[in-house]
Amino acid sequence: MTDAAGLHPVTIKAQKAVVAAAGGFGADIAMRQMQSWRLGPGISTTTQPGSTSEVIRALSDIGAWVIHMQYIHCVPEACADEKGWGSAWKFNQYCAASQGLWVVQETGRRFVNETADNTTRTNAVLGVISAGEHCLAVADARAAAHPRSALFKKSDVEALVQRGFVLKYATLSELASDLGVPLIPLQDEISRINETLAANDPDDYLGRVLSPTNELIGEGPWYACRFAAKVQLCGGGVAIDSQARVLSVTDDAPVPGLFAAGEITGGLNGEARLSSCGLIDALTVGRIAGRNAAAA
């Protein structure tokens, strides 16, 4: 770091211990792409611009064991036209994924089980993007009126329409014409879902479990939102033990006086992390790291 004027380097030395808590590297395109070629400049992130890899690199330079760097987790349903994670993802998830459909904009065909696990859906969305195509979430009036969430309402859908992130059309043909979606394949996909619902079959042909409360798709107005996968969390980082001590790459022993917590650590999530665990991870391990650093 530098002094207040930004002219001279300043070195800060710790007497007892250091806790590394610099977060992940979701905004570091070079580091991301070293781990996965698909996560290049064309893939955005839900994190802030400071989510970079300098601290992980520095820890590695002094011998910290860095693990699981390839486990970079994305949200598969973020609005392509909204900065960061935003809020239009709620329409894509609570309306279209559960009661509508996700299609490739250029073909009008579904490409994944819309309610599959995060990793499966992310890989499918990245596959569409890698092919130079785009993902589109589509829902009818019934789905928009009854989102599958206690915190996301019909009024929220209309607010997204007003903001321009969700598009609204009187008819399906108008939607298809305006967005360049082949109408006949899109109608065919909707018909296949409706046939499954009419037959009381719990699973559609892509394996999506259909709720008994799902209604037939077909009532206008129609809603659509372009979406894409965006990097949200990096599951890799420095290895720690149960006491939040950073482990050495040479002998697996704790590096004296060095602790870490939060997204900068690796080994706590694995290939497919469970949602809603990020804050618990940071707070729980952070308290352990803080107590042990203070006692060092």
Image (cartoon, rainbow, N blue to C red):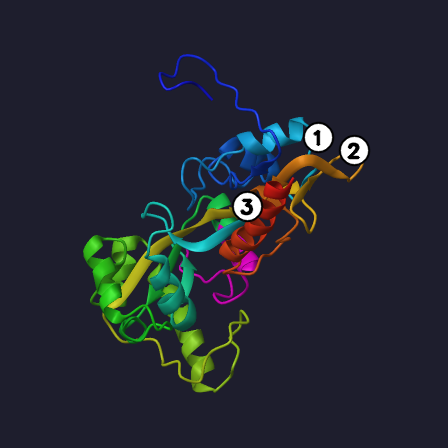
User: Where's the C terminus, which quadrant?
Assistant: top right
User: Disc 2 marks which residue?
Assistant: 250
Q: Is residue 121 magenta?
A: yes
Instruction: Identify the residue at the far right of this view.
Output: 251
Q: CA distance from mark 2 to mark 1?
A: 7 Å
Q: Callout 3: helix, strand or loop? A: helix
Q: Callout 2: helix, strand or loop? A: loop
Which three-letter amino acid code belongs to the residue tagged 1? Gly
> Residue 85 at what x, y percent from top left?
38, 51
Q: CA distance from mark 1 to mark 3?
A: 19 Å
Which label number is shown at residue 77?
none
Query: Which corner quadrant of the image does residue 212 belong to?
Result: bottom left
Along the viewing direction, whichever of 277 and 139 lies nearer the viewer: 277
Could you classify mark 2 by the number of other residues whose Cα lies within 10 Å: few (under 14), some (14-19), or many (20 or more)? few
Q: Residue at x 78, y 40 (%)?
A: 252
> Residue 50 at what x, y percent from top left?
43, 35
Q: Earlier in the sequence, mark 2 or mark 3?
A: 2
User: Disc 3 marks which residue?
Assistant: 263
| Range covered by the magenta-colored residues | 107-125
In the picture, measured across the screen, residue 34 lies left or right of residue 172, that is right
